[in-house]
Amino acid sequence: MIDGDTVEAICELTAYKLMQKKNLPEMQKRILENPYTNGKIKTLISVEHDGGTDYVLNWVKNGKMEMFDEDANLAPIATPTATSQILYGPKVLPQGLKFTGIMAIGNLRQAVINGVPFAVGDQKTIKLRDNQCLSVVKIFRITK
């Protein structure tokens, strides 16, 4: 079982890497200074920098210690073996429209039709089987 500070540090590492990718150094600084991890984030970032994200995730999966520290060494991760190429066929288009459900993100509601999200006021084209295209009329209201 992993201790709470280390669990929080693993979550914060994800946020830190995202802020790094978005080139937001002020947000990275805030993550480093926050008290949630009791300093574990700094250790985790250091180890991740040296060993990589896969190393950290390998520790989460296979490690035996409660806390991740600089001494929590695992064997190096083996180089992946070559795998056979997976080929995908063409996407099978739907025959008609199908309401999949409602997706809520905060106060924003979106209707999902054939896997395509529609917000109020959206008008999109959905391709159907047999070279048909439907221009879906605007969505005026979405309720639970």
Image (tube, rainbow, N blue to C red):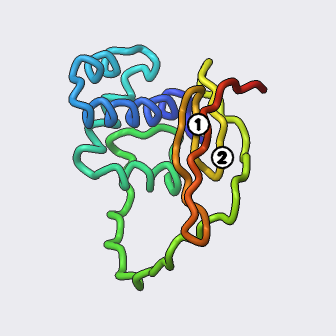
Work out whether residue 75 or residue 101 is closer to the camera in this orientation and state it: 101
Secondary-structure class at tag 2: strand
Residue 71, relative to residue 129: is it above or below?
above
Residue 134 lies, in percent from the top left, at 59, 53
On residue 79, the disc is none
55 sits to left or right of 99: left
Image quadrant where residue 16 sits: top left
Residue 59, relative to residue 111: is it above or below?
below
Callout 1 crowding tier (Cα within 10 Å): few <14, some 14–19, many ≥20: many
Residue 71, relative to residue 19: is it above or below?
below
The residue shown at (66%, 36%) is 111
Q: Which three-letter amino acid code belongs to the residue tagged 2?
A: Ile
Work out whether residue 142 or residue 131 is closer to the camera in this orientation and state it: 131
Q: Which three-letter amino acid code belongs to the residue tagged 1?
A: Phe
Residue 108 lies, in percent from the top left, at 59, 23
Quarter of the figure with the N terminus = top right
Callout 2 crowding tier (Cα within 10 Å): few <14, some 14–19, many ≥20: some
Residue 25 lies, in percent from the top left, at 21, 23
Image quadrant where residue 120 sits: top right
Secondary-structure class at tag 1: strand
The residue shown at (42%, 20%) is 38
131 sits to left or right of 141: left
6 sits to left or right of 30: right
The residue shown at (54%, 69%) is 131
The residue shown at (38%, 15%) is 34
Work out whether residue 4 or residue 13 is closer to the camera in this orientation and state it: 13
Is mark 1 in CB contact (under 8 Å) with mark 2?
yes
Image quadrant where residue 119 sits: top right
58 sits to left or right of 138: left
Which residue is labeled 1 in the image?
A: 118
Which residue is labeled 2 in the image?
A: 113
